[in-house]
Amino acid sequence: MCSTYTCNFRRKEKLDDKTLFILEAVALVHDCGIKPAEEKYGKCDGKMQEAEGSAAAKKLLFGFTEEDAKRLCDLVAHHHTYDNIEGADYQILVEADFLVNFYEDNLPKEKMAETVGKIFKTETAIKLAREMYSL
């Protein structure tokens, strides 16, 4: 049984089973580079998370096929890189991360709206951003 959130993405964004599986798995591990980055650099900005995240993710991905583990590590290593987004899993991961970071970083509405306009592509995430943040 899938959550309402992922069922909405599956239906509205027409995700196949494989893409949904990768998306749900990467949602669980995408920030695994935070602690290693803090230990190594004393801070954990997005690029540092990406640099340390792939190695940390590899330790968590036992039981995954080599192909799936490679995709997951690649997504972890690039989830703060917003050019050349390829694949629905990558696009949705970036959008979901922004939706959380808007709140955590207490961004002004103008900056949120600008980011949604530049980065967001999925109908579902655009609608969520508008509803959650009154954009």
Image: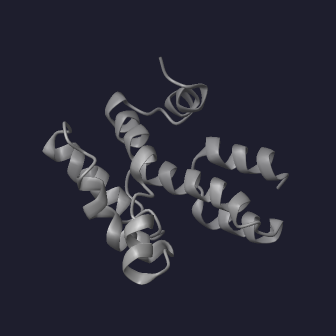
**Colouring chosen for the image of the structure:** one colour
Within the image, what quadrant is residue 53 found in? bottom left
Closest to the observer, 124 or 99 = 99
Against 65, is 60 above or below? Answer: below
Q: Residue at x 65, y 54 (%)?
A: 99
Q: Residue at x 63, y 46 (%)?
A: 125
Outermost residue, right direction?
Answer: 134
Closest to the observer, 132 or 114 = 132
Residue 103 at x, y = what percent? 73, 58
Outermost residue, front direction?
Answer: 39
106 on left or right of 124: right
Within the image, what quadrant is residue 63 found in? top left
Outermost residue, top direction?
Answer: 1
- For the C terminus, the quadrant is bottom right
Closest to the observer, 14 or 112 = 112
113 on left or right of 123: right
Residue 77 at x, y = what percent? 34, 65
Residue 81 at x, y = what percent? 44, 70
Residue 102 at x, y = what percent? 70, 61
Q: Residue at x 40, y 50 (%)?
A: 29
Against 53, is 62 above or below? Answer: above
Q: Residue at x 49, y 74 (%)?
A: 44
